[in-house]
Amino acid sequence: MSVLSPLTPPPRLLMGPGPINCYPRVLSAMATQLVGQYDPVMTGYMNEVMALYRDVFNTKNQQTFLVDGTSRAGIEAVLVSAIEPGDKVLVPIFGRFGHLLAEIAERADADVHTIEVPWGEVFTAADIEKAIQEVQPKMLAIVQGDTSTTMLQPLEEIGSICEAHDVLFYCDATASVGGNPLKVDEWKLDAVSVGLQKCLGGPSGSAPITLSDKFVKTVRTRHHVEAGIRDAHHESARGPKIRSNYFDLPMIMDYWGEERLNHHTEAASMLYCARECARVHLEEGQENVIARHKVAGDAMLAGVQAMGLAPFGDLKHKMYNVVGVYIPDDVDGEAVREALLLRFNIEIGTSFGPLKGKIWRIGTMGYNAREDAVLHTLQSLETVLRMQGMTLPQGAGVDAALAVFTEAAND
Amino acid sequence: MSVLSPLTPPPRLLMGPGPINCYPRVLSAMATQLVGQYDPVMTGYMNEVMALYRDVFNTKNQQTFLVDGTSRAGIEAVLVSAIEPGDKVLVPIFGRFGHLLAEIAERADADVHTIEVPWGEVFTAADIEKAIQEVQPKMLAIVQGDTSTTMLQPLEEIGSICEAHDVLFYCDATASVGGNPLKVDEWKLDAVSVGLQKCLGGPSGSAPITLSDKFVKTVRTRHHVEAGIRDAHHESARGPKIRSNYFDLPMIMDYWGEERLNHHTEAASMLYCARECARVHLEEGQENVIARHKVAGDAMLAGVQAMGLAPFGDLKHKMYNVVGVYIPDDVDGEAVREALLLRFNIEIGTSFGPLKGKIWRIGTMGYNAREDAVLHTLQSLETVLRMQGMTLPQGAGVDAALAVFTEAAND
């Protein structure tokens, strides 16, 4: 084949459920030249990343670091390190990513128990307490925000329930972190995994996680040092060996810890990226970032409603950063998405499973939780729906969004 | 904590066993803004990456793509997808990374059989054939270049042996790819995994792999589609489910294939990076890149020998891109490395296991397989050894290296 041309992607505005456009500063950080993996400069950066993500997660957990892979790498690392075959795991499922947690736990040979609510709803704390009492699991595994449904599961009361029943409380917060509150210590979470590609404004490819001392103690019983680098002073394995080398959290902790015991070679450019995502977030201030996501999300919701479109699901429990919108009758949902993409350079999302073909998902995340991004999206959606033959009130969507932003600015 | 300062790493020259400095073009590519994961532009880039790495691997294998993680993610994906509990796997070990292959295969509950040669040597084809006859494994798993010893295992004759005994032939070529010949189809390899952070001149964090049709057929018997996205037309699982979701190669192939079935969210910036690494490699021309690594490696070897330092291992089987150098008596190896790093901004490598404290490892890889990088390293090493009280012939190392480069330029 001929050698291909340089990268010249079109300037898409990514208003789907993620990934979204990166903050420009995050892109610049990734172009930084490398240092060696045990260079004191690099290990210093690793320590800084740990400190920065403690602030992102609102935790004092020492064990706060990156798993090198996409978000589901963080999920699998948590589950496969904690689960021994036969362990009971309870997974409340309210969308696609609940199924994913159950699927990953099943592959780790957990005894998986699930409860479900219809897509578009969330669980009450009482639902979860009842299931915990029945199942008596070792771990509760739940998603905070499931982009497949746009729902945000309240977590505030669940930690105390887990504590009372001696259950490890694990949550994947990839879709919600950075755009919605997430208080790891206050909510008594034992393990949380996230990704960069939603409200943190980075690309997919690095999975920050945080682990409570209780969780660490559990996985440390399966600690094991590789034959190729084991010294006399290293203890041999105690509990059953974790089934994955790559996702063996005790070994990854040894690499991020004082001993700096070789495991993988840290993905340095993605670490630079994760560091900058956290800096952008913390410089703006977590409360300010979340407030910006709320305003942008409210504006998008007000806009689509003013256009006469119906939002999906229980709006009291919608994530700030994404809204589901029913595709109107007689409108070809995919043709709308294609025209938005190819004529206006704007991407909105399709959907999965029971919602496939029924709703669009429109995100307002990270760098794109911005007034201009919301306004252009609503205007373009109006135009494309007109192109599809729909009759809409002129400018109703964009005007409603403008009103929300104006009100927020005056507050 | 206070919000931390921007990234300003010192301009290290990374002359260890990898990671090394990235090609500047590769860093620039990573700073490119994203497009959505199912954008035709993105799926086009994915197809281009597949085509580019077919050329890097010298293969026609359709299934040539990226695993999102560091090199050992690629290793684990190959092993965990192919191995069912109890399957016999033969691992010839000639350094640290052979132990790693065995360790990962053991965690997949393979029946692992190993043969070993002392560090600094490689296996003959006859050694391997004999072991295959004895063990009758499902798979042979071997490293091409083991950076822990600098040795390059000849692979040319092994493929036919594996074929004759119906053994899957898997090789990890992370340390050697791009700087030494690797002919996947000609050598009858069934699976090869690599990383970007050595001779391909990128950062760690993406693992290109290629799989023969025979290998694909083997892992497809364990094909399974996730519950959250399964449609009526998807077959349910056949063979025993692969134990990892993240490393389930049939699912990853579905994501890279025509169906574009959602699995992970592709790590777009690392894909941009992998694409540019391949472009740099193929634009220069694979034979030219390998020749450049040979000259730089020969020059570094001639340089250290002219300084009176002894190289490690069987030089007939040394990788072009790294040399082991015995630390002279009465010299503090770590003090030398520290002075090189902190005074000269040059990193050379320490070593693992039985070689720990005995040798340095000096690399000439990717962007750093350059005359100026070799010359600065040899001069600085001379200066630092003088600082340590050693007596050396003035400029002998740099002069010997200059002679090698001059001769190569005149050829």
Image: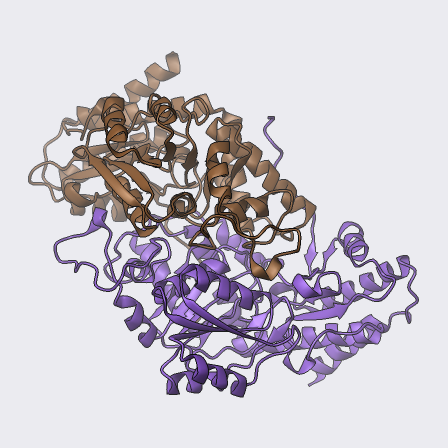
Chain colours: A brown, B purple
Instruction: Please indicate whether residue A174 sits to the left or right of residue A42 in the image.
Output: left
Residue A28 visible within the image: no
Instruction: Please indicate whether residue B351 sits to the left or right of residue B26 in the image.
Output: right
Instruction: Please indicate whether residue B102 sits to the left or right of residue A145 in the image.
Output: right
Residue A329 visible within the image: yes
- Residue A26: image location, x then y, percent: 50, 41
Q: Quadrant of residue A305?
A: top left
Who's the residue at 36% across and 53% down the image?
B246
Q: Give the farthest residue toward the top.
A: A411
- Compared with residue A97, is residue A39 higher up or lower down, i.e. above or below? below
Front position in the image: A307 or A152: A152
Front position in the image: B402 or B249: B249
- Compared with residue A123, is residue B83 higher up or lower down, i.e. above or below? below
- Residue A74: image location, x then y, percent: 42, 44
- Compared with residue A215, is residue B178 higher up or lower down, i.e. above or below? below
- Residue A246: image location, x then y, percent: 47, 54
Who's the residue at 16% across and 40% down the image?
A355
Task: State how many labels appear.
Answer: 0
Who's the residue at 46% across and 39% down the image?
A218
Front position in the image: B44 or A202: A202
Quadrant position of the N terminus of chain A in the picture: bottom left
Q: Quadrant of residue B170?
A: bottom left
Quadrant position of the C terminus of chain A in the picture: top left
- Residue A327: image location, x then y, percent: 14, 37
